[in-house]
Image: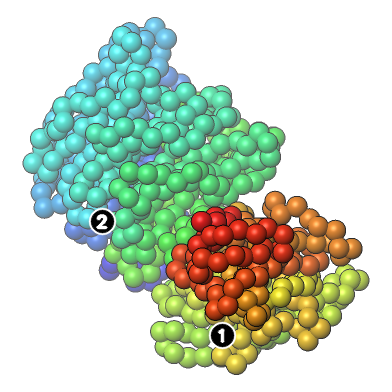
Amino acid sequence: MKRFTSLNIIILMLITGVIRPQTVTLEFHSDGEDQSGFYYHQVDPYIVMDEANNNFGLVFTQLGYLDFFFPSVRYWQAGDPWNNQYSDDINPYSDEVLDSRLHIIQGTNQVLILRGDDDFTPQNVNDIVGTWTSSYKVGDGNWTLERYESFTRANTSYRDYTSGSNEVHFLTRELTANGERLKYYKRTASGSYSPDGYDVDNNTSVLFDLTVGDNNTAYFCYIIGSNIKVRKYQENPISIATITQIFTPWNSKLQKMVPPTIAYNSLSGKTMLVFSDYDTNTQLWSLYYSESSDQGATWSSAEKVYENTRVATYPHLSADKNSGDFFLSFLSFDDSNISNHIYLQVIGYSEVEGGFGSQPLEIADLGELDNGSGLGYRNRPIHSAVIPYESSTQLLVSSVYFPSDNYEVDVRLYRVEFPNTVTYTFRNLIVDEDPGGQFTLTNKVTNTQETFVSGSQRNLNLDDEYNIETLERRFDDYNYQGTVKDYQHHHWDEDNSRFKLADDFTPSSFETGKDAKYISLASITLESIGSIQIRDPWYYDETLDEQPDDFYLYTDVSNPDGSYEVFLNQDPQQQDVYYSLRAPLLINEGNSVYQVFHRWLAMKANGDTLSPTGIFENEQSRETRVVFTDSVATVEAEYFNVTLIGEGVNLSESSGELILFAPEYIVINEIDVELFDSWTISPQGGATIT
């Protein structure tokens, strides 16, 4: 994009738990745009992309003061200076224009504005309120009414500029004799509307959003009562969560119950929904997300994006089609005092990492919480978009601003550029201490490699893939706060599934480094008359110089004293990696004497037997997952003693864990005498004699 050749590079710093850019570009602010002598509110920010001319702009609604409303929709286009391209003024009635949205129809001379008009004065509650769609023809200078919907309030619209589609999708909230309902429309590039109305759900609140996914299919998210729902066009709604927020105001511009937000990423094919809520259990404000990777057929359970004692509200989600990532903008403030300031923040979702960053970026101070008096406006105060014209990632975020010197509300637009490089710190960590050691970092794109000490920083290219390897597998006899223990590498960062010493990763602007986490070990003993095999994901084969994550003979990997060191409490129900044990099914001791596997036993240090529940996945299966707890000192494979009577008789294993032998007498543990043909040991446990 030509006009972005001299952008400021933003350096990210970690300060008191929040990553702050040193420089954020303030692209536009609406204060002082009108000099009529009245106070004016500029609200409803919406970023407009003009991809045909490699430019962007901002549309907002301007409202008057002291009940003399002069509602207008204004579009300001980026430039030097910015200029007011279009202004859609209507008569000065006591009403408010809501959710103004402007879409540039590429390949035509049209600009489309969708707006809602609402009369909030009590004496006019029965007056018609409506949604207008107006098209402006460049060079003509006149606005022409294209469509009008009566008895509607609030609307939102979306056009997928990243795919080049000129279709515009929008939702309105219709007031009916039986309550409210959402209606959906689609405007084609030729100006026709279809369908002619679609009931998304009855009794739906004003809180809703939409996005456009595959094949120009619309997705809606909304609140019904306290339920967050998502719906693909022409399919049944899916409930995502139940929220606890209540519909009460912080001020006349900001409500505690806010719309959810939804966005589709054309590169990853992922649709994501985000909502805000107050967690009554933790007493923390939280942002939650749910995602679908199968065109809305299924949605993941709601997971926390971020939580804080400070309010986290009014989320707005935008997709970056160049990376598959998402950017989530939101307002953050401490509502314990109305003089506290409101801050605009953003946190990113990395498609490569499969999750959100741990800390948000702080973009701007938006003024004091109590400076929201004036008009009874209620709507979404944030809009964001990713500029699709550059190789570097640039995020535009617009928000309302509350000046401290008067009651006006302004609109401001910020540009945040995420640089092509990011600084990472690499550390070995025992709990919270750096014990030292070294790393080897390999750039898999340039095939360059370097080794450095723990705690070092390196500048990484965001577009490259790297491999980081900690060279310290163990720290023996390490003194952590007065306690000496052996520590071994367990996982990277907060992801237990990344258990190997070397880890592949792609850098993210929302992360500050990579940590190799070390956990203390416990010694246990494995006993059996046969050769036990253990699957230890953390086992390091010095001969092969790798971690094969496979079964190995216990005698091959055990310590000289017969003990074996393990991590405790690696529960397969809660962990991504875990231990498994395998014992031989059949042991031939000669002279028609055999040992047949019976079960697994776990014992304390004093020899007392432990209940197998919670230790073995199946104690009767010769191959089972196992959890070593602090009470487990010894694990033993128990066998039946089987003696065959008759010359030339023998046992043998076959597929399906079946023991076969000739029809002769057999003695099991020298107690039971039976005549049978075969004995089947189920892989899931148990035995059958036939």
Distance from Cα at disc 2 to Cα at disc 1: 44 Å
Residue at point 51% right, 80% down?
Answer: 467
Q: Position of residue 436 (x, y in %)?
A: 74, 82
Can residue 509 be seen?
no
3 relative position to 300: left or right: left
Disc 1 crowd rating (10 Å Cα; few below 14, some 14-19, many 20+) is: few
Of badges 2 and 1, the one in the foreground is: 1
Q: Where is residue 558 in the image (x, y as percent from the top left)?
A: 72, 82
Q: Mark 2 vs mark 1: which is more N-terminal? A: 2
Tell me whether circle 2 and circle 1 mark residues in contact (CB < 8 Å).
Answer: no
What amino acid is at disc 1? Answer: Glu
Residue 400 is marked as none
What sort of colour scheme is used for the picture? rainbow
Look at mark 1 in the image and give the residue it sits on: 546
Quarter of the view holding residue 573: bottom right
Question: Which of the image's four quarters has the N terminus?
Answer: bottom left
Q: Where is residue 397 in the image (x, y as percent from the top left)?
A: 43, 51
Element type at marker 1? loop
In the rendered view, tell whether residue 150 sits above or below residue 450: above
Residue at point 20% right, 59% down?
Answer: 53
Quarter of the view holding residue 262: top left
What amino acid is at disc 2? Answer: Thr
Residue 162 is marked as 2
Element type at marker 2? helix
Can residue 292 be seen?
yes
Disc 2 crowd rating (10 Å Cα; few below 14, some 14-19, many 20+) is: some
219 relative position to 308: left or right: left
- Closer to the camera, 523 or 442? 523
